[in-house]
Amino acid sequence: MSAQVQQPQLTDDQWLQLHRDQLVKQNVPAAVHSIIARKMNHEIFDCSTTFALQDGTTRVVKATPKHGDAWISDHALVFRAPTDAKAALAQYPGLAERFATMARCEPEDALDKAIWRYAQALPGARPPVWCVEDEIGNG
């Protein structure tokens, strides 16, 4: 499964200028700031290409040198109503495939067999706001 690349509104350098303080405050090594800027700016959520889940545990699929890469994990979907979730699956190619892989089902069954299996209501939200974490968060 490949990560989908979005066209950014900012250049990677502009993104980094806006977010560098956040990275520094979180003690993210400076060596990976430009990698994170590129991946966040282009919405490349690629942890599933390096890490895999097996029997509820995370294992490394490929290794890279220390600080040679950074992997972006995300909340794969946040929605209020089932129709919002269904629309997101239609709008974002590859999302249904990701959920299908997580739930070991076919992409066309992702709404029923994956989203509702992993969806969690965010605390305090009224009406409920539902969140489905990515492959790592659901491990």
Image (tube, rainbow, N blue to C red):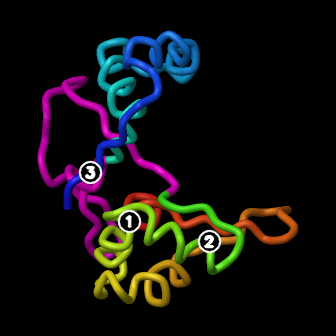
Chain-order first, disc 3 or disc 2 = 3
SS assignment at label 3: loop
Q: Is residue 51 above or below residue 114?
A: above
Q: Quadrant of the N terminus?
A: bottom left
Q: Is residue 21 above or below residue 120?
A: above
Q: Residue drawn 39% across and 12% down? A: 13
SS assignment at label 2: helix
| Mark 2 → mark 1, Cα distance in angstroms | 13 Å
| Mark 3 → mark 2, Cα distance in angstroms | 22 Å
Q: Is residue 49 magenta?
A: yes
Q: Is residue 111 magenta?
A: no
The numbered mark at residue 3 is 3
Residue 107 at what x, y percent from top left? 32, 81
Residue 98 at what x, y percent from top left? 33, 68
Q: Which residue is mark 1?
A: 95
Q: Amino acid at mark 1?
A: Leu
State the extent of the magenta-drawn residues as a range.
Answer: 46-75
Q: Residue drawn 44% across and 88% down? A: 113
SS assignment at label 1: helix
Q: Which residue is mark 2?
A: 84
Q: Quadrant of the C terminus?
A: bottom left
Chain-order first, disc 2 or disc 1 = 2
Q: Nearer the viewer, mark 3 or mark 2?
A: 2
| Mark 3 → mark 1, Cα distance in angstroms | 10 Å
Q: Residue drawn 31% across and 64% down? A: 94
Residue 66 at what x, y percent from top left? 20, 26
Q: Is residue 13 above or below residue 4?
A: above
Question: Are the two marked residues, 3 and 1, in contact with CB atoms closer than 8 angstroms?
Answer: no
